[in-house]
Image (spheres, rainbow, N blue to C red):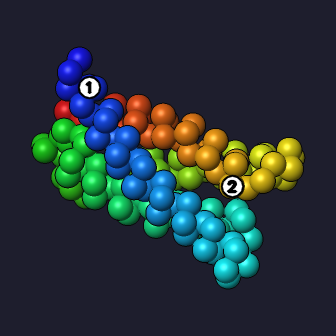
Amino acid sequence: MRKLIEQLFKFGIVGIIAFVIDYSVLVLCHEVFHINVLVSSAIAFSISIIVNYILSIRWVFDVNKNSSEKRNFILFIILSLIGLALTELIMWCGTELLSINYLIVKIIATGIVMVFNFITRKIFLEK
């Protein structure tokens, strides 16, 4: 149980770092470069995933060393793409259907996808 709590704490730190990158790039793309919100969200999510992968594999999860790094990376990307699809769905529903400010919707989407990411990465990447 202690290991799980420590892992959740580390995952939270990595999540905060990835969120700051994700949120900052989203605002930069949309507000400064006037890129569509959904495209901006996808760009931001993709950039934050690279940082998230490096930190998650090296610091958070006890990755199965019997699996190749290539396999782990592909699994991570597949799970992240599912997370991206979920993020985009939430962003679209929140901004287009419910007319909620995209910055608020992004926070909601991040919370939901963060739970999804922890559970799926723990199941598929750890020993």
> Which amino acid, by three-letter code, is at mark 1?
Leu
Report the residue at 19% width, 33% height from top.
127
Tell me how far mark 2 sits from mark 1, CA to CA: 31 Å
**Percent position (x, y) of residue 68?**
18, 52
Q: Is residue 12 left or right of residue 89?
A: left
Nearest to N terminus: mark 2 or mark 1 = 1
- Judging from the image, what secondary structure is the residue with disc 2 in? helix
The quadrant where residue 60 appears: top left
**In the figure, 64 relative to 27: above or below?**
above
* Residue annotated with mark 2: 103
* Residue annotated with mark 1: 4
**In the figure, 34 relative to 88: above or below?**
below
Q: Are dots 2 and 1 in contact, CB under 8 Å?
A: no
Mark 2 or 1: the one toward you: 2
**Percent position (x, y) of residue 61?**
24, 40
**Percent position (x, y) of residue 93?**
78, 46
Outermost top residue: 1
Camera-side residue of 59 and 74: 59
Report the residue at 69% width, 72% height from top.
30
**In the figure, 1 relative to 53: above or below?**
above
- Judging from the image, what secondary structure is the residue with disc 1 in? helix
Other residues around mark 1 within 10 Å, as few (<14) / some (14–19) / many (≥20): few
Report the residue at 33% width, 55% height from top.
53
**Percent position (x, y) of residue 116?**
49, 36
Q: Is residue 66 left or right of residue 87?
A: left
Other residues around mark 2 within 10 Å, as few (<14) / some (14–19) / many (≥20): some
Which quadrant of the rendered structure holds the N terminus?
top left
